[in-house]
Image: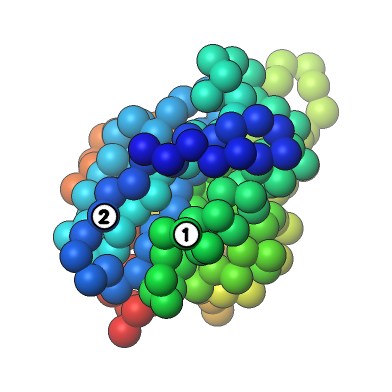
Amino acid sequence: MLDIETPHGPARVHLRRVESPRGWLVLGHGAGGGVQSRDLVAATEAALETGFAVALVEQPYRVAGRKSPAPARQLDAAWLAVVERLRGEVVNDEPVVTGGRSAGARVACRTAQETGTAGVLCLAFPLVPPRRSGGKPAESRLPELDAVAVPTLVVQGERDPFGVPPGSATRTVVKVSGDHSLRSDLPAVAAAVRDWLDRIVA
């Protein structure tokens, strides 16, 4: 593990190394979960099999023991500090792909240009929050995805209550059985990640 100081407290990075990596995959967790979520584990194992080293990033609020996520600007600032430190001290000349689960995917999308990522991996992107009884419809987060100019993979449960984003010229969307947890078909999640990472570095 590697503790990295950020503007909002220390983040913790769990490193999974491979010999002569083809690239690095840097992944963030969801709003209320950690880096042990099953889909992140499946993506990690798929990346390792593809020859990618993996860095799993715990945001400062999780390291501090809090469950409620920090504001978006704090999440983004901490993420940028982590990626910069990894590029300076851990990564050599290999391409870096960023991504995450749910809220972590949003962070990777919002910071894609600043991190200089080669691609963005979104596991269960939270497209539109489910409407609360009697409340106004929530705004779509599709602009965050559309702003990403590099190749993007979205792996989404076909019954995800947040919906399924559309594909585009740069965005591949793979629907798997299940909901927002992506637990129903982890082999399908892993296969999608493995195939896409292979194409990224081809």
* Color scheme of the displayed model: rainbow
Residues under labels 2 and 1: Cα distance? 14 Å
Pair 2/1: label in front: 1
Q: Is residue 98 left or right of residue 16?
A: right
Q: Is residue 121 left or right of residue 109?
A: left
What residue is at 42 percent from the left and 40 percent from the top?
2
What residue is at 44 percent from the left and 54 percent from the top?
26
Residue 17 tag number: 2
Furthest toward the front, the residue is 89
Residue 24 seen in this snapshot? yes
Furthest toward the right, the residue is 136
Q: Give the image location of residue 97, x and y in percent.
A: 46, 64
Residue 97 tag number: none
Image quadrant assignment for residue 20 = bottom left
Q: Amino acid at mark 2?
A: Arg
Mark 1 nearby-residue class (10 Å; few <14, some 14–19, many ≥20): few
Q: Amino acid at mark 1?
A: Glu
124 above or below 195?
A: above
Q: Quadrant of the N terminus?
A: top left
Q: Give the image location of residue 23, x and y in percent.
A: 35, 69
Q: Is residue 27 left or right of residue 166?
A: left
Q: Quadrant of the C terminus?
A: bottom left
Q: Give the image location of residue 96, x and y in percent.
A: 46, 67
Does label 2 or label 1 sit earlier along the sequence? 2
Mark 2 nearby-residue class (10 Å; few <14, some 14–19, many ≥20): some
Q: Secondary structure at mark 2?
A: loop
Q: Give the image location of residue 32, x and y in percent.
A: 53, 23
User: Label 1 belongs to which residue?
Assistant: 89
What residue is at 59 percent from the left and 32 percent from the top?
10
